Image: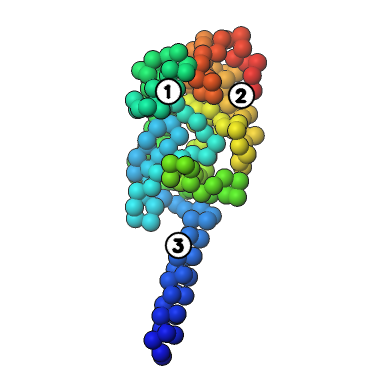
Amino acid sequence: MKRGAKSLLCGAALAVLLLMASLAWAGAATVEVARINDGDTITVHLRGRPELVRLIGVDAPETAHSKSLARKAKRSGRSATQEAQAGAASRAAMLKLLSVGDKVRLVDGRPQTRKRDRYGRLLAFVYLADGRLLNQEMIAQGWAKGYRSFNFRHKSDFLRAESQARLERRGLWAKGEAYDLERRTRVSPSRLNSRP
């Protein structure tokens, strides 16, 4: 075989391998949990390396003191410590659902969502070993809020779960003044159940 034909064949083989690697994530992948970062982000072992995974359609409070947390606290008129406490409660709730070493199934949200968010995190629906959707569980238990700003699979289920959590005052909604993740403000009890 001539040198040009060999390099062409090697190039084609490499292209096929790269395509196969990208298709491996296209549908679903079973992975091991490496870390629970916060109420809407986990780290998993994917193809032998750590990968940050952001739960599609879920917004939980920040856990760590950062510029982002400080901005959100300032907008809401609360201290960064109060904001971080809500984030720590959300993370603690996820730790009750998921542990390091657990196997979860990641399901791609495309074509409705991108593969990665602007921070490079993989966007996925995360299914627990018992078949429950972690994204929806965090919302249903009241430890996170469903996104309203973009469309994604399960959006109506997430928003119904959030409404129910608010009505039943679960998780972050448990106090008389519930934590509103969208506005980063307190919501009076009389308005709590009037919003979706």
Q: Residue at x 35, y 18 (%)?
A: 81
* Residue 17 against residue 2 in the figure, above or below: above
Q: Let me know if residue 37 appears in the view.
A: yes
Residue bearing the label numbered 2: 163
- Please state which of residues 13 and 32 is positioned toward the viewer in this rendering: 13
Residue bearing the label numbered 3: 21
* Residue 2 against residue 167 in the figure, above or below: below
Q: Let me know if residue 129 appears in the view.
A: no
Q: Is residue 159 left or right of residue 107?
A: right
Q: Position of residue 148 (x, y in %)?
A: 60, 31
Distance CA(mark 3)–CA(mark 2): 39 Å
Q: Which mark, residue 169?
A: none
Q: Position of residue 114 (x, y in %)?
A: 54, 47
Residue bearing the label numbered 1: 71
Question: Which of the two discs, 3 and 1, sits closer to the camera?
Answer: 1
Q: Quadrant of the C terminus?
A: top right
Distance CA(mark 3)–CA(mark 1): 39 Å
Q: Position of residue 62 (x, y in %)?
A: 41, 27
